[in-house]
Image (cartoon, coloured by chain):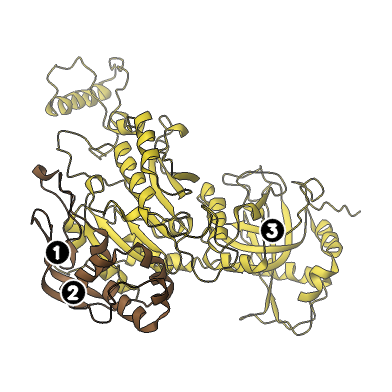
Amino acid sequence: MKLLTHNMLSCHIKGVRSGYPFLIEVVKVSEHEADFDTDFLKHIFPRINWPAFLQGAEAMGCREGLPEAPNESALEDEQFQKAFHHALLEVTLEEGSLICPETGRKFPVSKGIPNMLLNEDEC
Amino acid sequence: MVRVVPNKGGSQADDIPSTSGREYLAYFVHRLLEFRKPELESLAQTVGCKAEEIRWRAPAGDVEHSPFWYLTLPSEDAALQISKRMILTKMLVEVWGEGEDWADLTAAIQACPQEVKAPWLGPELTFRVVVESFGSSLPMDEQLELIKRLEFIPFKGAVRLRDPQARWAPLRRRMNGEGARGSLGGVVPARLYFGRLVGSSDRGVIDTYSLRRRRYLGPTSMDTEMALVMCNQGGVRRGSLVLDPYAGTGSILVAAAHFGAKVMGADIDIKVLREGKGGERLTIHSNFQQYGLRGPLDLVRLDTHRHPIRPDLAEVRLHAGRPQGQRAPIYQRKPPPACAFCCNPLALRCATLPYTQPYTLGECLRDLLELSARLLVVGGRLVYFLPATPETYDKAEIPQHPALELIANSEQILTTRYSRRLITMEKVRPYDAAAAAAYYASHPDPTMSIDKLHDIVYEQLPPQPPSSSASSSSLAAAAVAAATEGGGVDGGTAVKPRRRCRGKNF
């Protein structure tokens, strides 16, 4: 699971109000090279919830080079682009889990694939 | 006697005078008839043409499913760009002349204005002639003879078969009398066209990704040609983000990755996503590796009925600063933010509804439309297959959403009783939760008549008259025996549903 996906997911258990963002429990992190595409970064940037992204990057150990609160102009900076690209699309959570900040429910991530299915009593 | 018949189907004079744009003849592959025009239109929009700049003109004979159609595009560059990706169109040709026979054609070519011809006849341009014939194939000697007859055109350049700078395509449509077979036999008049070949499609790509050689397959893997067409319909291009919420073995994602998109897959079935084929350790990723494509960004196990996508994701508008719904300016080289959903929700399952409660196709599509209406950018597209049978199909039943507009609806006939329709929808306005809620309140029941597919498949046949001959009575006895075995309690009198296909449920 990449941080891009982490940024899109929130806990959907019935009744949960503040299920975003998921806390990340890391067992194993790997890196997969992704095609660098400035246009894609610019297109996806406004959709990223930055505090959640930083929190995820912290947990995955790729926080370096990411500013606290970047604005659109930061996207022109090559250093920033590289750090953003790396943390967003290359660093992968192979094994671990996503933890709901409200209920503590763990959604397991194995072989890079988060299992977001709910149990019958949760929906 | 020479009769000059420029175009029977609709002469230039009758048409609205074309103030801008250039007209090309699209020579279609003669299959998936309802898909061919929408594919070219979608591609034209993908390369930046505005919808109003794309115009169709019927060919001579005025047959809806003719393999030739005239298409006006804003520029030659657009035609070139389109031809690099088109799957269901063989070539785009700038026509210099057409006619019912050679005399007509010769006269038309000679009548073609000098300013069109001159730039392409210079001595510095190498060229070759590509003969195409629809309805029958031409042996080489006939092709050569055809080329010889073109010698009246003052070609000055040198012939070069490999990588010529200009290509010429005499197209021949021979339908009446000889070789009049197939769906158009006797309907389309014979016709000759000659023109400059602007671009031809690379249908070899279908074979490159052929399912026969793909390593990881499932029972519903999408046919390569169709997956590529779906991506063309969805406007998938470099820099797009494509999500298939019913990814399965990733056959649509592979096609999207071929066009340079970043892809994500979701499925409810963890086995197909994570475990793959046992023993050889084949997964979706091995399919991408096989073709040297960059693998999917992520795969997620989720249920589209109760999905974990954060609720505020749609509120970030991507087309900020641009009026709503306006398309990217023409030939903007950098890809505009586009996001497409391409999926095939046929193999559906829902985990959050108890097994006793069926998850109908109508409900599934409502979930799908709702999710895409929220996640797509304005201008982004949703492409999916809708199963249909001729008896139950009703255009009014196609699921709708206030934020989405139907772009194309193309039927692919599978058998006499079943077909599927490729539905293309575009997000035309920002997502508005209130409008969506109002729409659902006015349409509370999403069930479609195709949801009764089980009944359609196992339809009750009218009672059969008692069999008289000995041979058929033994067959009937066997049938009754099989029926009682299958749970029939009320004896032989009631009519048993006849089994029409092997599939148990949808």
Secondary structure under tag 2 reads: helix
Q: Give the structural element (helix, strand or loop) at label 1.
A: strand
CA gap between label 2 and label 3 equals 66 Å
Gap between marks 2 and 1, in whole Å?
Answer: 10 Å
Which chain hosts label 2? A
- Badge 3: chain ID: B
- Asked whether, in this view, residue B170 is left or right of residue B264, the answer is right
Which residue type does callout 1 highlight?
Leu
What mark, if any, has residue A23 been given in the picture? Answer: 1
Q: According to the rendering, which colour does chain B have?
A: yellow
Q: How crowded is the residue under tag 2: few (<14 C-alpha within 10 Å), some, or many (20+)?
A: some
Residue B9 pos. (x, y %): 74, 46
Q: Is residue A83 above or below residue A9?
A: below
Chain coloured brown in the rendered structure: A
Q: Nearer the viewer, residue B271 or B60?
A: B271
Cα–Cα gap, marks 3 and 1: 66 Å
From this view, report whether residue B177 is shown above or below residue B157. Answer: above
Q: Residue at label 2?
A: A58
When asked about the image quadrant of residue A30, the answer is bottom left
Q: Is residue B410 visible?
A: no
Residue B376 percent across, percent down from the top left: 39, 54
Q: Is circle 2 on the same chain as circle 3?
A: no
The part of the image, by quadrant, that contains residue A96 is bottom left
Task: Tell whether B61 sits left or right of A119.
Answer: right
The quarter of the rendered structure image containing the N terminus of chain A is bottom left
Identified at 89% across, 55% down, the residue is B2
* Mark found first going from the N terminus, 2 or 1: 1
- Expressed as whole percent of the image width and height from the top left, the position of residue B473 reads 24, 21
Residue placed under numbered mark 3 in the picture: B172
Quick one: label 1, few (<14), some, or many (20+) residues within 10 Å? some
Please state which amino acid type lies under the numbered disc 3.
Arg
The C terminus of chain A sits in image quarter: top left
